[in-house]
Amino acid sequence: MAEKIIVKAEKREDRGKNVARRLRADGKIPVIVYGGGTESLAATAALADLAAILRTDAGVNTVFSLDIAGDVNDVIIQDRQIDAVKGRLIHADLRRFAKGEKIEMTVPIHLTGHPVGLDEEGAILSQAMREIKVLCEPANTPDSIDADVSEMAAGHSLHVSDLKVGEGIEIVDSAEAVVASIIIVKEVVLEPQIVDEGAEPIVEGEEPPAAEPEAEGGE
């Protein structure tokens, strides 16, 4: 599991467009923190810290710790406002989690190992699912779910029910869903076409030449 990101913030009393403008000039942005069974509060955080979170692989799904004067809570970026001209983050709503609260997250699926079935001619590994939904506490969110496919033979499939997750993590997706399969791709042998060398070539868009009438027999 990746090291938890900690973002420091400060409570904000003053509000308004002028205040927000001064904050952005200082490299900070206004944020609203809500949820977790407590009242919402206004705060400020460094633009660089929040922008770095949005650039991670998980992006807005990243769960991080928000430290406001020593009061630390797990939060996630629930909503954000981007400057249409500069393309920069200018405001964020952060959802705070209560202790023991579980959330639904999407995590990637990584296949490991070399399947034995790939040794057969024409066999390929097809991955139908590359991410999966899980329910867990924010601090327990896995970076990925790894599945060893070394023992997979040709014609066999890996299902969601075969995936192994840690304690306290529940998979939301259907247990019967196929994650990956070893399939055999066979070459299609085309039958040779017989070409009548005496036939007139037909140009696309033209009508084929009409057959000449047979001459009537005479005495």
Image (spheres, grey):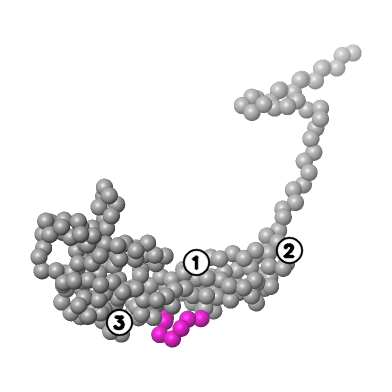
Reading the chain from its start, which is encountered first: label 2 or label 3?
3
* Badge number at residue 213: none
Q: At label 2, which amino acid type do we have?
A: Glu
Corner quadrant of residue 35: bottom left
Q: Quadrant of the C terminus?
A: top right
Is disc 3 placed on a helix, strand or loop?
loop
Q: Nearer the viewer, mark 2 or mark 3?
A: 3
Range covered by the magenta-colored residues = 164-173
User: Where is mark 2, residue-wise?
Assistant: 121
In space, the residues marked 3 and 1 are separated at their CA atoms by 26 Å
* Badge number at residue 130: 1
User: Where is mark 3, residue-wise?
Assistant: 101
Residue at 72% over, 55% down: 187
In space, the residues marked 1 and 2 are separated at their CA atoms by 25 Å
Q: At label 1, which amino acid type do we have?
A: Arg
- Residue 59, horizontal then vertical, whole percent: 37, 64
Residue at 40% over, 76% down: 3
- Residue 121, horizontal then vertical, whole percent: 73, 63
